[in-house]
Amino acid sequence: MNMTGPAESNRGVGPSVLGQLLRDRSLRLAAGLAVAVAIPVAVLFYFQFRSISDLSKSSTVVLKQLSQETADGLTRSVEEALKMPYINTLLRTSQNQTEPLNLTVIAPTFEQGLEIEPFVDRFYVWSDVAQEHRGEVLAYDRESHGFHAGVKEADLMVRRFRELSKQKRAISVFEETIDGRRTYFQAQIRFITPAREQMSSFVGIRVDAERLRREYFPKFLAEKLKNVEGPIGFPPLAVSLMDAAGRIIVPTTGAAPKRFEDDRTFPLVFFDPELISFAAPDGRPAERWHIRTGYGDQTIPQIIAARERPQRAMMAMLAGVMALGVFFFARTTAREVRVAELKSSFVSSVSHDLKTPLALIQLFAETLELGRLKNTERAHEYYRIINSEARKLTRLINNLLDFSKIEAGLRRYKRRYKRQPVDLAEMTRGVLDSLTSQFEHNQFTVTTRLDDHVSARIDPEAAVQALENLLSNAMKYSPEHREIVVEVDRADGYGVVRVRDRGIGIPPRMRRKIFEKFFRVQHDGGSGPHGTGLGLAIVDHVMRGHHGFVRVDSEPGRGSTFALYFPLDAGESHGDETDSGDRGRTADVARSA
Ligand code: ADP
């Protein structure tokens, strides 16, 4: 009677087709979950990213504006300051005061000028129509605080202003080097007749360009910059002043930032650009100085990018962490769902597996009991089937019990194996003997190469179970070439029990997974041998518990070799295995197993 076909029966509703479906369902659930979490998170991140870039845009505008406005404001202030002497002093000293010369009226104006226009060195008045001091250049300065004649620049001034007066302009400026210093002279010129034929008087000032450069501008700009506040969290706004030749005047260290955002120029004559058109040109183009603003050596986009970078990196990191979280969450959920569903299908497949051999046992036992069988050979065959089905039941139940222990062990305690010295060849022979009838019944040829005296310290019950599982699989997954080779030998310091078959083999990518609980390779679209997916999980657990391992070599279509590697018994070499040292080691192993 061949109830089990070529392969051993460990039948049941294998989770093959159903498992696939369930797997899909769990994947669907995981994907749904991932999407449900990922969409709001993505939306959140999108808005966060947008607000970062909005912030960057507005910061760019702020930085640009600050730079522009500061440059414009400073240029305006400089121009205003430079034209002050013209408005405050030169224009205020009218022709009535210079012709005839009224020094008592002029003196307070000059005195005030010295006070409020710090860059002016000296004031001058000259009148060609005065009663007293006629044709004399009278100077008024910080040293004298009164008028005095005989300054050495007097002749130069009269000569140059006379020349410039030929252009019939009221405002005249010229530059001259005096005592090695560049000096500007500016005057408001008065003429005798409205036709401006002849200069009758002038009021003038003198400015030391060097002092302007060294003292006045640095102080002036520093004063103005006190009121400029940079946006918080950005590099401060840097202001520099350069002369026409590009020499740095401010900062006084002479090191201006290489990059600038805005560049404004102003004419270095003592009135604003509008008044230049009224001035008598002295032949030289008005010298233009520069005011530049910027943020150190970085451009605004660089500053913004530098500020954005950590924020974006942070966001990207957060997104990564969240994505990982979602992934693991979905994966765990999918696994849990898959395991839960496989478990429930497993229960039904196990109950089926229990029922079938039981029914067979019952049927053959009843037939035997009724004593209807005349043929003793038949009766013997029936006994053999009962015995073989009972063994299958035992193996199934053992696997189940073991699995439940493993499950509990994984959570609460590690299973402790009762280890003792066991001769692997002897153990293997025992297992093969007990399975003889199954091999014969399923027409398997079993070849053995068993090295004697390979001793390992193992729990015989667990090791037998592991070996039985391998042999049962070898039968189950060898539909055509029913040849099994079993070997025992030593390799790499291990005692090895090897089971070779010439069955269907295992695809390479599955070779790790077959040791996972419930995992089964789908054969023939689900119509292949049935099973619980626990056999190899138990083998793996047993081997780990013995500080050994199980190794699989397989070629799809050609067969598989499963090898159990048990650490050799240290005492085997001298043949004494029951000394106290061994016992101590057993205790150690049990503890760490
Ligand atoms: P089960 O045999 O109950 O399915 P196992 O844990 O014993 O569970 O085996 C897991 C899977 O490994 C099997 O479903 C089978 O696909 C594959 N497998 C195990 N042993 C062999 C073998 N000797 N030849 C081919 N495939 C095997």
Image (tube, helix red, strand yellow):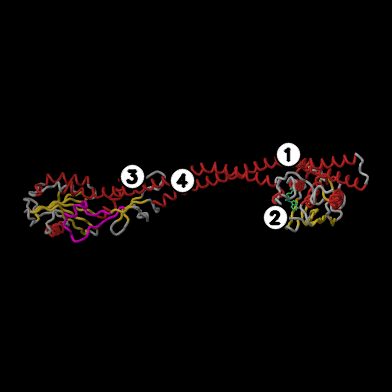
Dot 1: element: helix
Tell me if label 3 and label 2 are in contact, CB under 8 Å: no
Q: First in sequence: mark 1 or mark 2?
A: 1
Tell me if label 1 and label 2 are in contact, CB under 8 Å: no
- Of tags 1 and 2, the one toward the viewer is 2
The residue at the far bottom in this view is 283
Estimate how packed mark 4 is, as few (under 14), some (14 to 19) or many (20 or more) residues with alpha carbons within 10 Å.
some
Q: First in sequence: mark 4 or mark 2?
A: 4
How many marks can you see? 4
Tell me if label 4 and label 1 are in contact, CB under 8 Å: no
- The quarter of the picture where residue 255 lies is bottom left
The amino acid pointed to by label 1 is: Ala
Dot 2: element: loop
Question: Is residue 449 inside the magenta stretch?
Answer: no
Q: Is residue 360 left or right of residue 288?
A: right
The C terminus lies in which quarter of the figure?
A: top right
Disc 4 from disc 2: Cα separation: 46 Å
Q: Which residue is mark 1?
A: 408
Q: Which residue is mark 2?
A: 507
Disc 1 from disc 2: Cα separation: 31 Å
- Of tags 3 and 2, the one toward the viewer is 2
Q: First in sequence: mark 3 or mark 2?
A: 3
Q: Which residue is mark 3?
A: 228
Ligand 1 within 8 A of label 3's CB?
Answer: no
Q: Which residue is mark 4?
A: 49
Estimate how packed mark 2 is, as few (under 14), some (14 to 19) or many (20 or more) residues with alpha carbons within 10 Å.
few
Q: Nearer the viewer, residue 426 or 68?
A: 426
- Of tags 4 and 3, the one toward the viewer is 4
Disc 3 from disc 2: Cα separation: 75 Å
Q: Which residues are magenta?
A: 265-291
Q: x and y percent of residue 510 in the render?
A: 69, 52
Q: x and y percent of residue 35 in the render?
A: 55, 43
